[in-house]
């Protein structure tokens, strides 16, 4: 089954949509992918990863609202023999719906966000237009969590053609003790310390200030280090705050984003996720895949991923976050139980191969003209 995935860009700093994970599992699910990006990127990390998996990648190199977007996308759909186009994020949704009509193939769209922040009149009009376009032109709208599904139903006033398909990630395989030792040594973290990892992009809404507040509140005696593995516009501010605080400077390490995140997870004892919102954060799925317990804010679809067996959910409060870190740092047996439960839950529910098979089921129903369940 030939499926074209349409995205605004393949730049790594964009919202992670997991196309590399999906591409690695696609063949086993009987899917053949082609990826079309409306804009080009100077950072070819994801482009190269997809091509190593023998996935054709086309970057159209167009600016937003370029009138050539629809005809050029439709031409790529025809050229690659796509049977269906799967769009991701609003710019691609708009272009993809029109291009699919022109190429005479069906289209589906995945929702990747929950947007609960106040919006001005212009934002509300744009959101309403996108909802109407999905309802009219998309054969399916895919939510990645139950909470996101209910949020979207509330916005649109209808659950028509709306289905839930949780994302998945690639299985990193069993932990490698030697890799763990080497990675921790590079971070100057010994085996008696608890290493907490945050891989969130360094931009507003990710909760880095909450995490640093919590780290400053930790007792001095606690053997705990924090690795911040993201990048983004807030990096200089974060570095400045850490440099001006003795408590933070003693605990916090900055890890360049080009370094291998899977290696960092292999070295971690806990993963922390402090974002203000999230439909189904992929960072938590990767933590589960690596068998690392999670400490996360109770927002969006996070409680559907993090359970009492696999981690700790906290309100968006620095004191509560600090208490959870202390409790888990001081209880290695509990962390071990959570690690085992996380890995088992990943294998049962969030492996990329199962995700690809779930998507294939959606595609098959669309191509066969089967109506979505109410």
Image (spheres, helix red, strand yellow):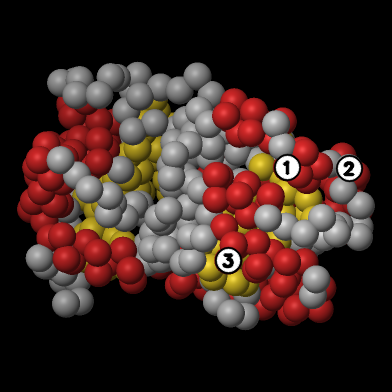
| Residue holding disc 3 | 320
Calculate the distance from the C-alpha at mark 3 to the C-alpha at mark 1: 18 Å
| Residue at (64% x, 33% y) in the render | 241
> Residue 143 placed where, x, y %?
31, 62
| Residue holding disc 2 | 188
Instruction: Classify 126 as above or below 312.
Output: above
Query: Can the viewer see residue 25?
Result: no
| Residue at (35% x, 24% y) in the render | 39
| Residue at (56% x, 45% y) in the render | 208
Which of the 4 image quadrants contains residue 67?
top left
Name the foreground residue: 178 vs 233.
233
Label 1 vs 2, first from the N-terminus:
2
Instruction: Classify 326 as above or below 180.
Output: below
Q: Secondary structure at mark 2?
A: loop
Q: Is residue 279 left or right of residue 46?
A: left
Q: Looking at the image, is mark 3 or mark 2 nearer the viewer?
A: 3
| Residue at (35% x, 37% y) in the render | 7
Which of the 4 image quadrants contains residue 33?
top left
Label 3 vs 1, first from the N-terminus:
1
Q: Looking at the image, is mark 1 or mark 2 nearer the viewer?
A: 1
| Residue holding disc 1 | 248
Instruction: Classify 41 as above or below 4.
Output: above
Name the foreground residue: 291 vs 357.
291
> Residue 358 placed where, x, y %?
40, 67
């Amino acid at each position: 089954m030939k499926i074209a995935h349409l995205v605004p860009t393949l730049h790594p700093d964009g919202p992670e949509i997991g196309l590399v994970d999906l591409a690695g599992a696609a063949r086993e699910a009987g899917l053949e992918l082609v990826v079309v990006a409306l804009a080009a990127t100077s950072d070819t990390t994801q482009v190269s990863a997809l091509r190593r998996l023998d996935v054709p990648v086309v970057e159209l190199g167009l600016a937003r609202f370029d009138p050539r977007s629809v005809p050029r996308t439709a031409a790529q759909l025809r050229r690659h023999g796509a049977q269906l186009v799967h769009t991701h994020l609003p710019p691609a949704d708009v272009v993809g719906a029109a291009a699919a009509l022109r190429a005479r193939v069906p289209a589906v769209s995945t929702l990747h966000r929950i947007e609960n922040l106040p919006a001005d009149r212009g934002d509300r009009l744009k959101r309403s237009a996108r909802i109407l376009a999905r309802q009219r032109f998309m054969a399916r709208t895919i939510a990645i969590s139950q909470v996101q599904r209910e949020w979207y139903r509330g916005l649109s006033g209808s659950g028509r053609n709306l289905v839930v398909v949780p994302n998945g990630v690639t299985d990193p395989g069993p932990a490698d003790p030697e890799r763990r030792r080497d990675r921790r040594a590079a971070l100057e973290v010994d085996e008696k310390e608890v290493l907490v990892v945050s891989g969130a992009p360094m931009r507003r809404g990710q909760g880095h200030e909450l995490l640093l507040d919590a780290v400053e509140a930790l007792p001095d005696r606690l053997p705990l280090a924090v690795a911040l593995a993201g990048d983004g516009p807030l990096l200089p501010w974060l570095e400045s705050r850490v440099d001006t605080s003795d408590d933070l400077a003693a605990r916090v390490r900055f890890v360049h984003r080009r370094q291998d995140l899977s290696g960092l997870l292999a070295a971690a004892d806990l993963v922390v996720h402090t974002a203000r919102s999230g439909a189904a954060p992929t960072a938590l799925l990767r933590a589960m895949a690596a068998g690392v317990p999670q400490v996360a804010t109770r927002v969006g679809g996070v409680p559907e991923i993090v359970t009492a067996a696999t981690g700790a959910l906290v309100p968006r409060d620095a004191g509560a976050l600090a208490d959870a870190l202390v409790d888990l740092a001081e209880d290695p047996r509990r962390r071990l139980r959570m690690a085992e439960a996380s890995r088992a839950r990943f294998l049962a529910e969030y492996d990329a191969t199962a995700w690809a098979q779930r998507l294939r089921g959606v595609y098959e129903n669309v191509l066969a003209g089967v109506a979505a369940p109410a």
